[in-house]
Amino acid sequence: MEDGYSFFALISRLKYVTRWALMRNSDIENVREHSHMVAVIAHALAVIRRDVFKRDADPGEAAIAALYHDAPEIFTGDMPTPVKYHNDAITAAYREVEAVAAERLSDALPPELRGAFAPYFDGADAGTEELVKAADKLAAYIKCLEELGAGNREFSLAARQTRAKLDALHMAEVEYFIERFIPAFEHTLDQQLTIDN
């Protein structure tokens, strides 16, 4: 193919897709940054599931699935949660658009690579998917805490709602992560550096 395939060039452009569009942000977050944080947390949740709770989990697979979990947003943009889940009709329509976007992204790969990437667009196995969704919510909660720490009260309700969604998951891995790692996000860098000393 003379012009090559655009998959990775498109993935790179996720840095131009901003999140939290309906809210005033102290620090603008893009989808590429968000995907990295979700991948870090999904990996951690899988390690916690495997090593602490002795349940089957693949940390590498969780991290990769998380890296690509919002990739179709290169075509759709990041639809704000209150809009996306306003009613069943909007949610269903958005899912259809998302599926078309995922197919278009897959088509941006050489045919011989599409099978390897397909699971990340079609949905990972149930256990991995559960971890990625939990990591996505944790990343959103951390963003809320960071905004609140910067004095941005715009994120007060979002923080409460997101924490309630996390609590409603009743996932031991999430509870472990919240108890041991979330408090540090409410400290300054100097405080964070002295926590473990």
Image (cartoon, rainbow, N blue to C red):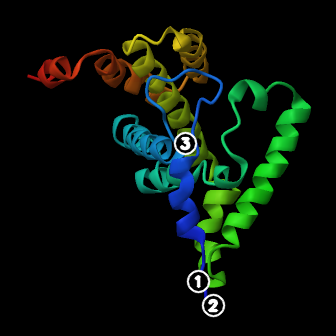
Counting residues from the start of the chain, the first of labels 3 and 2 encountered is: 2
Disc nearest the viewer among 3 and 2: 2
- Residue displayed at 58% across by 72% down: 116
**Which of the 4 image quadrants contains residue 124?**
bottom right
Q: Give the labeled residue for mark 2.
A: 1
Quadrant for the N terminus in the image: bottom right
Q: Tell me residue 90's x, y (percent).
A: 86, 34
Q: Tell me residue 21's x, y (percent).
A: 63, 30
Q: What is the CA distance from the residue labelled 1 to the residue labelled 3?
A: 31 Å
Asked if residue 52 is positioned above or below residue 96 in the image, the reply reads above
Mark 1 in CB contact with mark 2 (< 8 angstroms):
yes
Q: Give the labeled residue for mark 1.
A: 4
Q: Nearer the viewer, residue 123 or 126?
A: 123
Q: Tell me residue 75's x, y (percent).
A: 70, 54
- Residue displayed at 58% across by 83% down: 4
Q: Tell me residue 48's x, y (percent).
A: 38, 37
Q: Give the labeled residue for mark 3.
A: 132
The amino acid marked with disc number 1 is: Gly
